[in-house]
Structure formats: structure tokens, C-alpha cells
Image (cartoon, rainbow, N blue to C red):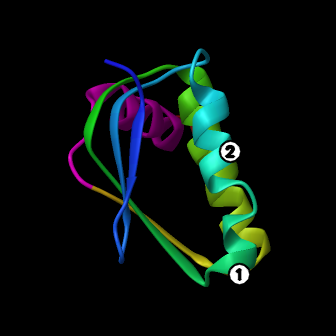
Amino acid sequence: MDLEIIKHPAFFQVKGTLTKFNLHLFKKEFSNIFDKRDSLIINIKGLTSIDRYGVNALAQLHNESLAKRKKLSIIGMGCDDLYEHFKSEETAA
């Protein structure tokens, strides 16, 4: 399944796969998002697969939110790959 980003009034829904092959779509959608919004909610419930490039894109979005003092929330029980990444980062720290 390809990447699909659906904009709702209060949040963005990310569905499908987030990989290096469609990362440009994700980056285009969220480019400079914190210049336009004070907070961002991304629902990853429909995310079925993510590779290290996708994880890195979410991490970059997180870093941008911190640098600009904006709120970022990632909600939903998405694919296990994402949780495993952050779980391994947490235990390594």
C-alpha cells in the first residue's frame, strides 16, 4: 500500500507505508508545518510499515517541534517497527 496522508480539521491521518520511496510526499506535506501551526497531531493507526527513513523523518519532525517550541503528538497504534525503534533507543540511552 502506498502512503496516504489525509488532512482532518484537528489532525493528520497517515496510512499505508512510509519508506524511502515515498518519503518525499511526507516531507512535502509537513515541510515548515510549524511555521503555520502551534501544534500538530499525526495519527499513525493506518501505518502498516515504516523503514528507517520514515522513522528518521518522524524524528526530524519531533526535533523541529522542539526547536520551535511547538507541540507534536503522534497517536494511534501503528506498525510495530516504529515502536521497536523507539523502544531500542530508550534502552540504549
Magenta stretch: dominant secondary structure: helix
Point 34% across, 67% down: residue: 8
Label 1, on which residue? 69
Give the position of the C terminus as an image quadrant.
Answer: top right
Q: Which circle, 1 or 2, is nearer the viewer?
A: 2
**13 on left or right of 55:** left
Q: CA distance from mark 1 to mark 2?
A: 21 Å
78 in the magenta segment:
yes
Indicate the position of residue 63 as horizontal and vertical percent values.
71, 58
**59 on left or right of 1:** right
Callout 2 amino acid: Lys
Name the foreground residue: 6 vs 37.
Answer: 6
Secondary element under disc 1, as helix, strand or loop, is loop
Point 61% across, 84% down: residue: 38
Q: Which mark is residue 28?
A: 2
Secondary element under disc 2, as helix, strand or loop, is helix
Picture layout, residue 10 above or below residue 11? below
Indicate the position of residue 11 as horizontal and vertical percent values.
37, 68
Q: Earlier in the sequence, mark 1 or mark 2?
A: 2
Callout 1 amino acid: Arg
Point 31% across, 18% down: residue: 1
Point 56% across, 23% down: residue: 22
Read off the magenta span: 76-91
Indicate the position of residue 76 as horizontal and vertical percent values.
23, 53
- Badge 1: few (under 14), some or many (20 or more) residues near its Cα, within 10 Å? few
